[in-house]
Image: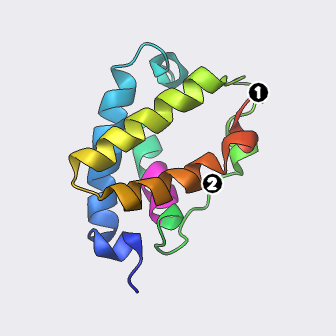
Amino acid sequence: MSTFYEKYGGEDTVAKVVDYFYDLVLADDTVNHFFKNTDMEKQRRHQTKFISYALGGPNQYTGHSMAKVHEGMNLQPIHFDAIVRHLRDALTHFGVSEEDISDALSKVESLRDDILYK
C-alpha cells in the first residue's frame, strides 16, 4: 500500500500544503505571535520535511526534538488546537480524504505532550 505521502504527490504537494497552512496560521491572532521573529522560509522548509516524514515520506527531518523546539513557548491547548484546525483546513483544501486527514492528525495529536506547557 502506498503511503499517504506517495498517494498525494510527495514533497511537492506537502510543500504546497505547508505554505497554505502557514498562510492560515499567520492570519490567526491566536497563534501568529509565536512566529513574529521566525524566519518563515526556513520554518516552511523544516515543516515540509517534518510533515513529509510524519505522512510516511523519507526522514529528512534534522531538527531538534518537539519538546526542545517548543521550549519556553508555554503553548496551551488553545494554541495546539488552532494549529491542528489549520492543518485540517489545509489538507482539506488540497483534496485529502477524511480518512487520511484523520490518520495524519492522529500522528500530530501524538505529539501534544511533547509540545504543550514547555
Left or right of 35, for residue 8? left
Q: Amino acid at mark 1?
A: Tyr
Q: Position of residue 105 (x, y in %)?
A: 50, 50
Tell me how the rendering is colored: rainbow
Q: Which mark is residue 117?
A: 1
Say if 24 sits above or below 90 in the image.
Answer: above
Crowd tier of the residue under label 1, counting other residues whose Cα lies within 10 Å: few below 14, some 14–19, many 20 or above: some
Residue at the image point whose x is 63% and y is 54% from the top: 63
Q: Position of residue 70 (x, y in %)?
A: 68, 35
**How far, Cα to Cα, is label 2 from label 1?**
20 Å
The answer to whether one can see residue 39 in this image is: no
Name the residue nearer the viewer: 38 or 109.
Answer: 109
> SS class of the residue under badge 1?
loop
**Image quadrant containing the N terminus:** bottom left
Q: Amino acid at mark 2?
A: Gly
Q: Which mark is residue 3?
A: none
Left or right of 36, for residue 10? left
Name the residue nearer the viewer: 62 or 3.
Answer: 3
**Image quadrant containing the C terminus:** top right
Report the magenta residues as a range.
46-52
The answer to whether one can see residue 78 in this image is: yes
Q: Which mark is residue 63?
A: 2
